[in-house]
Image (cartoon, rainbow, N blue to C red):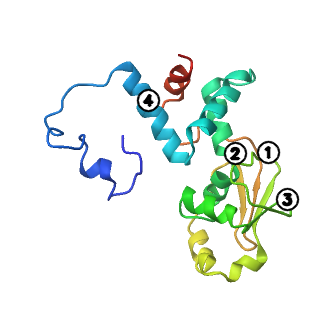
Amino acid sequence: MSVCGREKCAFKRKPYPPGIHGKSYRRGLSEFGTQLREKQKVKFLYGLRERQFKNYVASAVSQHKIPTGDALVSFLELRLDNTVYRLGFAPTRAAARQMVSHGHVFVNGKRANIPSISLKAGAEIQIRPTSLGKALFANIGSTLKKYNPPEWLELDKANLKGKIIAQPSVAELVKAYNTSVIVEYYSR
């Protein structure tokens, strides 16, 4: 149920609503409340604004190749900032977003500074060689030694390069959210 997964997460420490009546609050959520909570959870997880997220849901609904929920997860996972995070180059998605925005990442040999770029299979991501001297990348080698990327990514730890070798499989992703509820929310 917890969103962040860390031990100091506010949801783990206080699993009740804020305020003086928070602990005595027992009423369950309505259907709309459940849908809204799931939508907000995914939006905050990936660091998106409402319009961006709405556009991802609309494009997932409009395509007819794979189920809508799977397409939504695939679109979100193939963003450049998320891929940098999944490769282990950044400790959080927010740090990955900042890393991309500041121009520390190359995609297919070209500098990229837009975190929302949608990547395809075969795209190569690497840390800019001139950025490796920065304090941001001081201990990235020791961090990557212990890290194993998801199955759909290939990581060259020595050269700090990664490659997307396949579409992200929704089954292997740890889903802490329900995509069908999110699609229902936007189909109102």
Q: Could you tell me the amino acid type at mark 4? A: Leu
The location of residue 85, given as percent across then percent down, is 61, 58
Residue for point 25% across, 40% down: 17
Image: 27 above or below 157: above
Labelled pair 1, 2 in contact (Cβ < 8 Å): yes
Q: Could you tell me the amino acid type at mark 3? A: Asn
Residue bearing mark 1: 120
Q: Marks 1 and 2, how far apart in space? A: 7 Å
Residue bearing mark 2: 78
Say whether disc 3 or disc 1 marks the residue closer to the N-terminus: 3
Q: Marks 3 and 1, how far apart in space? A: 11 Å
Name the front one of labels 4 and 1.
4
Q: Marks 4 and 1, how far apart in space? A: 30 Å
The location of residue 33, given as percent across then percent down, is 37, 26
Q: Label 2 crowding class (10 Å Cα cut-off): few <14, some 14-19, many 20+? A: many
Q: Could you tell me the amino acid type at mark 2? A: Leu
Q: Residue 36, which numbered label?
A: 4
Nearest the viewer among 16 and 21 is 21
Residue bearing mark 3: 108
Image: 129 above or below 68: below
Residue 23 falls in which quadrant of the image? top left
Mark 1 secondary-structure assignment? loop
Mark 2 secondary-structure assignment? loop
